[in-house]
Image (spheres, grey):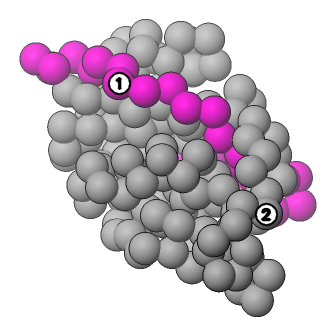
């Protein structure tokens, strides 16, 4: 089944209310022992670890998602690399883990030197499409989530 068909085959009734139930009832698969889901509506990212063919929730982190003019993509994706950070003349982010193309899980915004937080807001829709997390949470994903891990964003 291709990713779009797979994504559309899930029952999303519990997606915004009970993510653990959602991932286990839908028998979500990942080629690694980890799974990441992000609720765009609730603005939370969840980390799961496989435990005897069931998913166990490790973390639930508040996040910032794309603003209406530059929304975060929806779908099923697979982690495909990482970079220590990236930025522009105005800002820098740290611990970027690629979801697909130019979409990443990464830290809140720092000044261009990476020393000072310039936008630490979470729980909002204001990014260019990436998913912002506390720097420590972005680092955890960067350090622990292997390439190939399934990501579901809805």
Residue 140 part of the magenta-drawn span:
no
Residue at x 25%, y 29% (from the top left corner): 49
Q: Which residues are magenta?
A: 51-75
Residue at x 48%, y 44% (from the top left corner): 137
Mark closer to the chain start, 1 or 2: 1
Q: Are marks 1 and 2 in contact (CB under 8 Å)?
A: no
Give the class, few, some or many, for how many residues have Cα within 10 Å of label 2's Cα (few <14, many ≥20). Answer: some
Q: In this image, 7 relative to 70: left or right?
A: left
Is 112 drawn above or below residue 33 in the view shown?
Answer: below
Which residue is the extreme one toward the front? 115
Is 112 drawn above or below residue 45 in the view shown?
Answer: below
The N terminus lies in which quarter of the figure? top left
Indicate the position of residue 99 as horizontal and vertical percent values.
Answer: 47, 60
Where residue 98 is drawn, which disc sits there? Answer: none
Question: Which residue corresponds to mark 2?
Answer: 118
What's the CA distance linking mark 1 and mark 2?
A: 29 Å
Total number of numbered discs in the rendering: 2
């Amino acid at each position: 089944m291709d990713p779009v068909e797979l994504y559309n085959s899930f029952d999303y009734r519990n997606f915004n209310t009970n993510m653990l139930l959602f991932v286990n009832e839908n028998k979500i698969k990942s080629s690694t022992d980890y799974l990441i889901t992000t609720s765009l509506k609730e603005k939370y990212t969840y980390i799961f670890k496989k435990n005897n063919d069931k998913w166990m929730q490790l973390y639930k982190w508040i996040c910032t998602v794309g603003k209406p003019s530059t929304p975060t993509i929806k779908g099923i994706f697979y982690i495909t690399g990482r970079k220590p950070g990236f930025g522009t003349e105005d800002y820098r982010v740290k611990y970027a883990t690629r979801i697909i193309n130019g979409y990443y899980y990464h830290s809140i915004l720092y000044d261009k030197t990476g020393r000072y937080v310039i936008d630490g807001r979470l729980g909002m829709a204001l990014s260019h499409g990436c998913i912002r997390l506390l720097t420590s949470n972005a680092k955890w994903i960067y350090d622990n989530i292997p390439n190939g891990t399934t990501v579901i964003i809805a």
